[in-house]
Image (cartoon, rainbow, N blue to C red):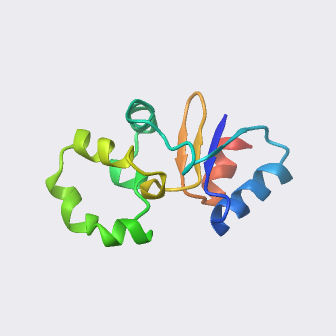
Amino acid sequence: MLFLEYPKCSTCQKAKKWLDGHEISYTDRHIVENHPTYEELKEWYQRSGLPLKRFFNTSGMLYKEMQLKDKLPEMSEDEQLLLLATNGMLVKRPLIVAEDFVLTGFKEAEWEAKLL
C-alpha cells in the first residue's frame, strides 16, 4: 500500500499516526519531492471510482492562486490530470493507493471501513 503525504501537513501527520497506531504497513512517499505522474494519477482516478475533483487539494494556496475553482469545469479530464501531475501541492493528501481502492484525504470512518 502506498501512502502519499506532505510531512508538514497536520492531516497527513494525523493519518500517519492512525496507520501506525493500527499497525498497518505502507510505503511512504513525499508528494512534493516525488509527485505523482500523469500515468499514476490516471490509473488511480480510474481505479478509485471517485470524481476527479476529489484528487485536487481545493483548500491549498496553489489551487486558490491558480483560480482552479473557475477553470476546472472548463477543462477536460485529461487536462486536469496533466495539471495535477505538474505539482504535488495540487494533489489532495494524504492519498492511499492500495490494490483494490484509493482514498483521498483523511476521513477516519472511511479509512476504518477500508483498512481494518
Give the image quarter of residue 7: bottom right
In x, y percent, where is residue 89?
A: 47, 58
Q: How many labels does the image show?
A: 0
- Give me the residue at 42% from left, 72% from top: 61
- Give me the residue at 69% from left, 50% from top: 112
In the image, 24: left or right of 114? Answer: right
Q: Spot the residue most to the left.
A: 74
Q: Nearer the viewer, residue 3 or 8?
A: 8
Above/below status of 58 relative to 84: below
In x, y percent, where is residue 26?
A: 73, 38
Q: Quadrant of the N terminus?
A: top right
Above/below status of 11 relative to 112: below
In x, y percent, where is residue 48?
A: 45, 38
In the image, 102: left or right of 39? Answer: right
Q: Is residue 51 visible?
A: no
- Give me the residue at 28% from left, 47% from top: 80
Give the image quarter of residue 25: top right
In the image, 69: left or right of 47? Answer: left
Q: Spot the residue most to the front.
A: 33
Q: In which quarter of the image is the C terminus?
A: top right
